Amino acid sequence: MMLCDSAQVADGKLYVLGGGWSMTGPDPVPSAIALKIDVGWHEAESAHHWELYLEDADGGPVLVPTPDGEHPVEVRGEFTVGRPTDVPEGSPVDVALAVNLGPLPLAPGTRYTWRMAIDGDSHPDWVLAFTTRPLPEPQV
């Protein structure tokens, strides 16, 4: 997983602009998460459900205002990958995903983490942390 300004997938490849940062803001700006997932050979040909959750420094959900009240920042999707005929049997199969996000109203000077789950499973290294810059000091 990588934080970036924007990302897209074309021909199974990730195209990333402004990638690899861990500081943003303090003003809300668009961002993206580029994902490369290795699907086990035995898990190909099956549908998989993925989820990304934005958490605060304490591991709680980040809530943002919506017209329907506050909701956690979550992104979900599905993918299915076939077994390529030109890949040796038993090899993992690549899946590229790009999640582009609009500006999120995040608190300045705060640490956040995107946590990923696939088919309800998550691992300690399936996280992507970043910090929002503090507000500039007022000019006197």
Image: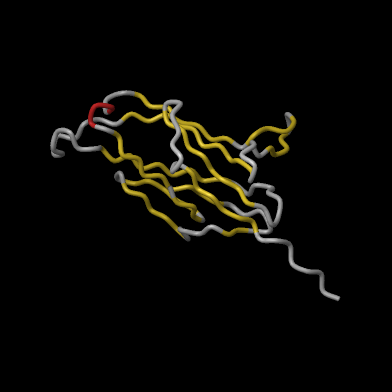
What residue lies at 81% left-to-right and 69% top-to-bottom? 138
Nearer the observer, 131 or 35: 131
What count of labels does the image hold?
A: 0
What residue lies at 54% left-to-right and 57% top-to-bottom? 22
Left or right: 45, with 125 as reference point: left
Residue 135, compared with residue 33, is above or below; it is: below
Please state, as top left, top right, bottom left or bottom right, where the C terminus lies in the image: bottom right
Left or right: 20, with 83 as reference point: right
What residue lies at 42% left-to-right and 31% top-to-bottom? 118
What residue lies at 51% left-to-right and 59% top-to-bottom? 21
Residue 72 x %, y % = 64, 34
Tell me the quarter of the picture where residue 90 sits.
top left
Residue found farthest to the bottom: 140
Q: How is the image coloured?
A: secondary structure
Residue found farthest to the top: 46
Left or right: 25, with 82 as reference point: right
Residue 64, compared with residue 1, is above or below; it is: above
Residue 103 x %, y % = 63, 49
Tell me the quarter of the picture where residue 82 sits.
top left
Residue 32 x %, y % = 51, 49
Residue 102 x %, y % = 60, 47
Left or right: 108, with 138 as reference point: left
